Amino acid sequence: MTTTTETPDTAGAQINAAGVLLSLLSAHSALPTATVELQYLRVPGTHDFRWGLEVALHNGLDHFEQWRQALGIDPGIIDHDTAVAGTLAWLTATITHSGVPVKLIGFYYQPEPATSGE
């Protein structure tokens, strides 16, 4: 069993995630603007949690795709979810980047189902 030494209730525990954010933004400054939050996330493939980044895109799947490519996320690990009612849907993928979990989310609206006019 892997254990982490970081204490999640101190600001210092967020330093690695903040550093990865700065690194990503510096390396990929032409990417579309995203909403980025420091979140306590599960590290993919483990039972551990640590401070990471949640990167959310609300302006179309083309923006999600640009971020996915920049982060090197395999399209095969992307999950698709749909709201119970309505047409809101989203894609998600979580990876580890420089030891920090990064969750990428792309929100979009699906077309409403066609209704028969019988």
Image (cartoon, grey):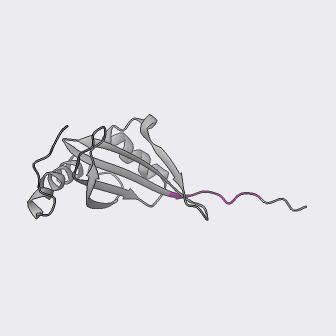
State the count of labels.
0
Taking the image as shown, residue 58 lies to the left or right of residue 27, namely right
Q: Which residue lies furthest to the right in this view?
A: 118
Q: Does the magenta-highlighted stretch encompass residue 79?
A: no
In-front residue for pair 48/85: 48
Q: Residue furthest front?
A: 1
In percent of width and height, residue 84 lies at: 58, 61
Which residue shows up at 33% across the image and 55% down it? Answer: 55
Q: Left or right: 48 with respect to 69?
A: left
Q: In this view, does 37 lie above or below 104?
A: below
Residue 61 or residue 30, whichever sits in front? 61
Q: Which residue is drawn at 19% across and 41% down?
A: 98
Residue 49 horizontal/vertical position (percent): 24, 50
> Which residue does the image show at 23% across and 45% down from the upper left?
48
Q: Nearer the viewer, residue 29 or 106?
A: 106
Residues rendered magenta in the picture: 108-114
Q: Position of residue 29 (x, y in %)?
A: 26, 52
Image coordinates of residue 59 in percent, x first then y, are 46, 60
Q: Quadrant of the N terminus?
A: top left
Say which quadrant the C terminus sits in.
bottom right
Please tell me whether the stretch drawn in magenta is mainly helix, strand or loop. loop
